[in-house]
Amino acid sequence: MMQPLPKQSPSQSIGEIGVNIVSLKVHQSLGWNFRRTPQELDFGIDGYIDIVTDEGYVTGKSIAVQIKTGTSYLRDGSNTETWRYVGDLKHINYYINHHTPVLLLLVDPQNHEIWWRQFSAYETEKTLSGWTTEISKSSYLDDSSKQELNFIAGHAKDYLSHLDDFWNIGHKAKDNDLIILHVTRTEIETRNVRVFASTIKRLSASRTILCNSMGKIDFLIMGYDEDKRELYEIPEVRLWIKIMVDGVKELAYFLWLDDYAQGIVTIAACLCNAKKIDDQRVEFTDIIPLLEFMDQQFEGLNELTETFNIEDYNKPVSMRFGNKIREIIGATTHTAEIGSG
């Protein structure tokens, strides 16, 4: 008598058919790649669709998929134009926290049809045992959905030009008296300070680069040439500056502070809620944040010079930075009294 053997359940067989149908559809109709999740690592994501350009370049952009296969899952929704997708409560947090967008797929194994929708927690309804959402019966996974899926995955960007500047900034610090960093309008509007902060961090990569970079960094905010407001009058710019200075505590060491410096003036005006009185005068409505910024930068300077054993630089940098802040305050009208900070 034959000994017992492992047995495949009907649901496992149907599930495997569904994964294969999805994989075939992704490759044939979309021209993209499909990576299935190993069964032992399947906690609610059955695989990933990897986006490939029409020229055959793999972009690095992906979409996660959860696949439900079989007629038992094809239940009418609130009307005859939708399917009712039923999910487990344990997957809600998992999908929300997932690093890629998540698609919910329903597969008809007989006709090889696939319906899809992007998971959105705020388009679900709670049930007694889990949650449910609806998928349009007209939302087929095929070449007609390619543009929308591309949008969901996100546009692949070319970072090499930026990285070239990032890689070479150490050489620039040595060979140039001034390095001007450009902050784009997109960075401002998305509150993205990572690029700016990463550049400053790059200049702190070694003692040699650090010593070559003292007082050489200025920055310009780009993309507002058509805006009649001054930069410090634009709320998005003010917010970006406040977020940036909260996270970058080494500016006192790196900033260029000569008469024509733009970065430090922009910081001061934004922090102090500056208002333009006329072409010659600017009013600082609150200078306390600027004084707090100065104290914060002194603390960052202490940490930086101690870490890299360049304490001799601390005093001259502190005096240069403090004098510049006092110069900026003295050149403006201000309604708040100068305090100790």
Image (spheres, grey):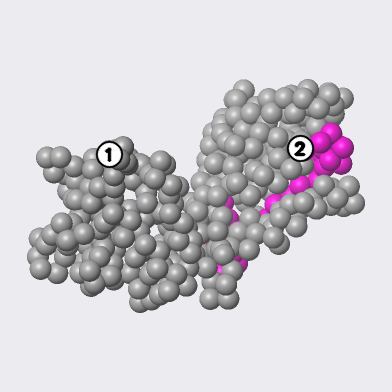
How many marks can you see? 2
Residue nearer the viewer, 97 or 308:
97
Q: Is residue 219 left or right of residue 274?
A: right
Task: Determine whether 75 is above or below 45 in the image.
Answer: below
Query: What's the mark number on residue 204?
Result: 2
Q: Is residue 247 left or right of residue 94?
A: right
- The crowding category of the residue bearing disc 2, from other C-alpha atoms within 10 Å (few below 14, some 14 to 19, many at least 20), is some
Name the kind of residue labelled 2 in the image.
Ser
Q: What element does badge 1 sit on?
A: loop
Name the kind of residue labelled 1 in the image.
Met
Q: Is residue 211 magenta?
A: yes
Residue nearer the viewer, 34 or 318:
34
Query: What's the mark number on residue 85?
Result: none
* Residue at the disc numbered 1: 1
Q: Which residues are magenta?
A: 204-232
Residue 137 placed where, x, y %? 20, 69
